[in-house]
Amino acid sequence: MKSLMQRIIALSVTEAETISGVACVQEMLYAIKILLSLGLLVELPMILEIDNKGAVDMANNWSVGGRTKHMDVRYIWLRELKEQGLVKVIWTSGESNDADLFTKNLPGPPFRKHAVKFVGEDVGD
């Protein structure tokens, strides 16, 4: 994997989070296909945690507002995956979003809090 800027322009934070969520689900589907090809069992639905309530609402509801009409292909695809039982989109608070470690310049305490999840505690001497 590598880090890239989005190749399209988002008109709102909600749209940017939805675009990121769709990209994440694409990677998750790829990983599932690899695991299944190895003969491993995969527990479904996959859980996609998003810290933007608007993006979560768009993924979980079929209503379309005037400001979101232009995004229909992305979030309709996400909804279809949800209805197929492949993905479950849930909201998580910003403070508990471990992905922030990779996407934001965090100050000391939040950085250490999230880093422990990935590298463990420093036991010292």
Image (tube, rainbow, N blue to C red):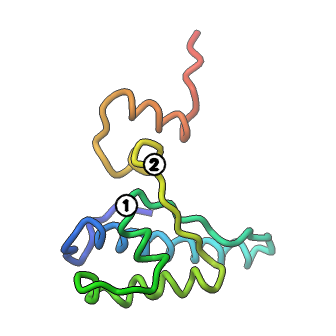
Q: Is residue 76 above or below residue 53?
A: below
Asked whether, in this view, residue 66 is left or right of residue 81, the answer is left
The spot of residue 102 in percent (x, y) is: 38, 49
The image quarter in which residue 5 lies: bottom left
Q: Quadrant of the image for the N terminus? A: bottom left
Classed neighbour count for the residue bearing mark 1: other residues with Cα under 10 Å, few (<14), some (14–19), many (≥20): some
The spot of residue 58 in percent (x, y) is: 40, 76
Closer to the camera in the image, 92 or 31: 92
Q: Which mark is residue 97?
A: 2
Identify which amino acid the numbered label 1 is placed on. Asn
- Residue at 63% x, 78% y: name it: 86
- Residue at 80% x, 75% y: name it: 39
The spot of residue 109 in percent (x, y) is: 38, 27
Identify which amino acid the numbered label 2 is placed on. Asn
The image quarter in which residue 29 lies: bottom right
- Residue at 39% x, 84% y: name it: 74
**Residue at numbered disc 1:** 52
Q: Is residue 50 above or below residue 7?
A: above
